[in-house]
Image (cartoon, rainbow, N blue to C red):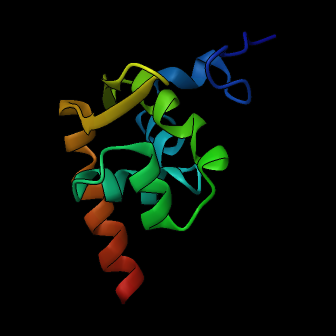
């Protein structure tokens, strides 16, 4: 029986070596795509992301942490009390931008 991935419970470890499966982990979550789009546009705090996307902060809150765990986003402390973070695309995240543009182009057609 294949081992389960602890970070992404629905994904088998055997899929970790497949590039398409890896891209689907990041871009397959409905709210990851608009979050990445807005971070690329400069909305780097969770409150700003939620406002731009029109999504409750609670619903959005787990996505940046997961994307940081995948090395797509970098996270740094923006405020100590309460703890608030700001996010930025890493080199891995920046490499996803052509995929987002391709999705935009496809969607526009």
Quadrant for the N terminus in the image: top right
Query: Does 73 appear above or below 13?
Result: below
Name the residue furthest right: 1
**Image position of 71 with respect to 61: above or below:** above
Residue 90 pos. (x, y %) = 22, 31
Residue 38 in the image: above or below residue 24: below
Residue located 66% across and 48% down the image: 59
Q: Nearer the viewer, residue 41 or 85?
A: 85
Residue 87 at x, y = what percent?
Answer: 31, 35
- Residue closest to the eye, 26 or 21: 26
Q: Which residue is at the front of the view, 15 or 61?
A: 61
Compared to residue 42, the image places residue 70 above or below, namely above
Left or right: residue 40 versus residue 72 is left
Q: Which residue: 44% across, 32% down?
A: 67
Residue ranking furthest to the front:
81
Say which quarter of the image contains residue 5. top right
Quadrant assignment for the C terminus: bottom left
Residue 49 x %, y %: 42, 54
Which residue does the image show at 52% across and 29% down from the upper left? 66
Residue at 54% in and 68% down: 54
Q: Position of residue 37 (x, y in %)?
A: 33, 58
75 left or right of 41? right
Give the tally of numbered discs.
0
Q: Is residue 63 left or right of residue 2?
A: left
Residue furthest to the bottom: 109
């Amino acid at each position: 029986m294949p081992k389960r991935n602890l970070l992404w419970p629905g994904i088998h470890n055997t899929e970790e070596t497949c590039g398409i499966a890896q891209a689907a982990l990041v871009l397959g979550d409905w709210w990851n795509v608009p979050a990445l789009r807005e971070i690329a546009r400069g909305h780097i705090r969770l409150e700003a992301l939620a406002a731009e996307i029109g999504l409750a902060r609670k619903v959005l809150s787990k996505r940046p942490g997961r994307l940081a765990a995948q090395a797509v986003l970098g996270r740094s402390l923006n405020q100590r009390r309460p703890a608030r973070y700001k996010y930025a695309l890493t080199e891995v995240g920046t490499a996803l931008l052509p995929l987002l543009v391709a999705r935009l182009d496809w969607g526009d057609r």
